[in-house]
Structure formats: structure tokens, C-alpha cells
Amino acid sequence: MIRWGSTALHHSTLLIGRRSLTTATHIRTPASRWTRRIAYTAAVGSGLTALYYTNDNARHVMTAIDRCGVAGATGVAVAVDYKLTLSQSYATEHDMQQAKKQCHLRCAHRVLDALQHLGGIYVKLGQHVSAMVYLLPIEWTSTMAVLQDRCDPTPEEDIRQLFLSDYGQALDDVFDDFDWTPLGVASLAQVHKARLRSSGQWVAVKFQHPYLDEFCKIDMQTVSFIFDCIRRFFPDFGFSWLVEEMRESLPQELDFVHEANNARRVQQNFATNNHIALVIPETYWAIRRIMCMEFAEGSRIDDLNYMKEHGIDPRAVSSELTKAFSEMIFIHGFVHCDPHPGNVIIRPAKKNHKHRQNFDLVLLDHGLYRTLTDQLRLDYAHLWTALIKGDEDGIRTYSHRVGGTDGYRLFASMLTGREWAKIHASDLTSLRDPTELDRMATGAMQLLVEVADILGKMPRTVLLLLKTNDLLRHVDEQLNAVPDEKITYVIMGQYCAKAVWLDTKSYLVQQLSVLGWQWFLVKRLWAAWWDYHHLEYSLRVYQTISLVLDDLRSLFKKWLPWQ
């Protein structure tokens, strides 16, 4: 009993001691508490760091959280900035417009920083914004323009791993020479020059950025969520179409087999056309994330120094580009929808070329195409014919058919980048003076809600046609020291007329085969043929006279420098 009691007493003493120690712990100094917190934080941080570098799933989760956090925080900051700016009272209309401009600029730079940090589809989103030059505030489009050329390359180690995992062979087993400096780096892929070990042929090899597979879906979901939240705060926010368009386009652009098929199709479309200096590089093989193509020497289509060195006339380049895309849009109905300067190469023509020019236009990056229905293709041709003529009734009718809008005057300005007064006066070919550009920019800001409403309601295919139109206009302006759109609209008018004539001819010939040689059908066919060829001849004469006059003006400037 005594032994038991001594033992019990001993345990009781230990228990009391432990309780005393526990109690003592609770009354430690604040410095001790902070020491323990720091220790716990360090332990947790070390554990998370170890997980990040040793566990792929943990690394994926943490990186995904970081990406969502950056995107979400940026979205909130932009929404709050606009909310505060738009809710304030201003003494004058000018003060309000200046405040909006500053808000646009702040938010654009904030978003640009986030897009460059996140890369991938976020950069693609910014590129879509930068292409809408005449549709969105200039503060946004000019800020996002840097994304067309500045993307971070995928490191060599990741490229080697991608090639091994997807192609099934080591990169060095297929290529005996490989230039690790990319020819170009875009938001979704990069291209390298390499030499095939089997044949010694130089090729261009396109690699998709590997991280896109990992984060593409969650990035799209994050962007969709942010846009939905912004729309709840701003009911008039009408730019959700950006996300919808990306959701439709992205899977196609991320599949290089699809891109290779597009390239082959457009190559076939132009196979028998000897009048346009367009070249589509051969595709040798393609799998989902890697593509091997013909290597094309040359420089970007906006490199005026390169053209001067090789005796290439920028005006002729501009005309050929207009012809190529007019053929795609109005005749084939199969349209390359991303013709920014990095996707079109200019080079001296090959010796065996069949066209009349001394240069080739090499069209690259065939991931984003749209197929137009015959009805849309013809309606679009009629719309442009009406725009060139200044035919208000025609513009009203075909704006509704093409864009699904009754706001035909605004829609016409969005298509042409010109004021309605110029369009209505059939004056699209006149020079844009700085005051008109200022008025257009101010109008875009004031009518931003209306513009967004039209863009949000129009078919996705038409939206991409607008983007393509803006990109082509931008290239055209860079190629012409003094922007002159006379020839551009003459060429477009020719192709619109050709599209209508071919459709009319097809219909009437079909009717003749069914009904026989009815006089009224023959008469209609003859009238349609005459209208088309008379217009074609008139436009060709106008085009020739315009070019001769331009050359004479250039000569007079050289002879009479004081003019």
C-alpha cells in the first residue's frame, strides 16, 4: 500500500508538474508566441515547397491556384476601377471623357501585366483585343499590341521532352542540325529551323507550348468566371463574346493536325490560280502538338527595308494581299482569320513562279479558319458593294442579313473604319485625316456599349471577319507611306462583283438545264454577264489610271522638291 501510495504520489507529482508546464506555456511572453508561429509557418512553407518540387499533382494544384489568383485579382481591380470612375460626377463632358481615357489606360496596363505573367491563352485573349483597332478604345488596343510579338519561348529541355513523348523518338535522331533560337514565338507555339537527318532538307518545326495542356481548361474556366462576374457588376458589359469565341477557336488552334488540313485545303483552293502571288508552305507531317513544314526564307510583310533591298513595291504587296483575302472571302468562303504581320512573309519570287509579281506572299499559321456559308459569302459581297457605292438601302438590308443588327450606320463604320458621312457620300477612298481619326476614337468611347451590343449579337464567323478586316487594314496602312485605299476598294469591288456574277450564272445555267433555252433566262444571263464585265473593265481602267497618276506624282516630287 505504501509502495502503491508512493507510486501514486509520484505520478500525481508528475501530472501536476506537466499541468504546471502546460500552464506555464500559456503565460509565455509574446516573443515566444511569435517564435512558435514563425517556426510553424516555416515548417508549413518548407513542406509545401517540398511538395511543389517533388510531387507533380501538388505542383499543378499550387500553380493553378496562383494563376487563378492573379487572373481573379486583376479582374476585381479592373471592375472596381471602372465602377469608381463611372460612378463619379464630372463638371464637364470633357472631364468625364478624360477620366474614362485614364481609366482605360490604367486597366489596360494592369491587364497587360497579368496576361504577360500568365502567358498561353491569356496572351491569345490580349491579341484578340489588340486586333479590334476600330472597335475598342485605342487605350486598350495600343496597349495590347505588344502581345503580337512578345512571348516567352519554351526552354530546350521541355522541347526535347515534348518531342520524345509525342513523336516517340529523340529529337537528335530525327534532326542532325537544330537552331535553338526560335524563328518566332507566339502565344500557343514556337517555330524552329532544323535539318532532317534522313534527307538533309531544311524544315520549319512548330512546337506547341507544353504547359497549355496542363492549364488550358482551368484558364478558360477562370476567364469565363471573371467575365461573368464583371457582367453582373456591369449589366451593359458586352464583351463576353471574346470568351465564347476563344472557347470555340482554341481547340482548333491547339490541334496541329487540324491546322495541316487547313493548309492543304487553302493550297488546293489556290492551286490553279496563276494571278495571285500567294504561297502556302508544304506540310510534311503533323501530330497534335508538333508539325514539320517546308522552310520559307523571307521577312515579315511590314518590313519595308527588306522590300527596298529586294526591289519590291509595297503598293504591289498591299494589292496582292487584298486579292488573296478577297479571293478567300468572296469566292472560296474559306478564310484565314489571323493575318497579322508575323503570319505573312514576303520574299523574292522563285524562278518557276507563274504570277506576274517579283515577290511571293507566304501565308503561315493556318490554325484559325472559318468556312462561310454560300448565303453569308454572297450577302457579305453585296454588303461591301453597297458600302463602296454608299448605297444606304443596301447597307441597311445586308447589315441586318450579315450582322443581325438594325444599327447599320454604326456597323458600317465598324467594318470600314470610316465615319458614316464618308460612307454615305461614297467617299471611302479619301484619305483619313487626323481629325476624322480623333472623331472615330471619341465616338468609339461614347458608343462603347452600342458597339459591344452589336459585337455580342453578331454570328461568331462575322466577328472573325471583322477581326480579319481590321488586321488587313492595319497591314495595308503600314505598307503605304501615304495611306490610299482607292486600289484596295477597287480590288474588293472586283471580287464582290465576281462573286455575285458566279452565283447568278450558276443559278441561271441550272434553270436553263431544267427549263430549256427559255428566252427570258438567256436574256437575264446575258444582262448579268454584261453588268459584271462592264464593271470589271471600268474598275481595271480606274485602277490603271490611279497607279499611273500615283507614279507621276512621285516623279514630280523628285523633280520639283519644293512641291
Image: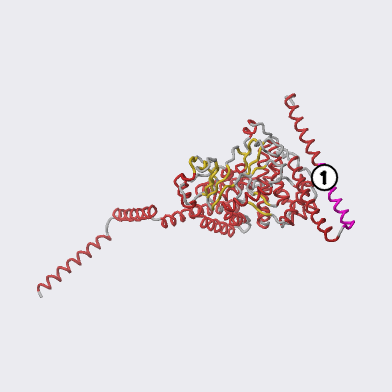
Picture coordinates of residue 71 (x, y %)?
Answer: 51, 53
Inspect this view and state whether residue 133 appears: yes
Give SS at disc 1: helix
From which residue to which does the magenta span run?
517-538
Figure check: 224 above or below 135: below
Viewer-nearest residue: 40 or 16 = 40
Mark 1 = which residue? 535
Q: If the image is split into quadrants, where does the N terminus sit?
A: bottom left
125 within the magenta span: no
On screen, residue 444 versus residue 125, left or right, reads right
Picture coordinates of residue 265 (x, y %)?
Answer: 65, 51
Viewer-nearest residue: 239 or 205 = 205
Task: Residue at 82%, 41% (x, y): give it.
Answer: 538
Residue furthest out toward the left: 2
Q: Majority secondary structure of the magenta segment?
A: helix
Which three-letter amino acid code belongs to the residue tagged 1? Leu
Q: If the image is split into quadrants, where does the C terminus sit?
A: top right
On screen, residue 376 versus residue 136, left or right, reads right
On screen, residue 303 versus residue 523, left or right, reads left
On screen, residue 518 versus residue 377, left or right, reads right
Picture coordinates of residue 29 (x, y %)?
Answer: 28, 55
Picture coordinates of residue 134 (x, y %)?
Answer: 67, 46
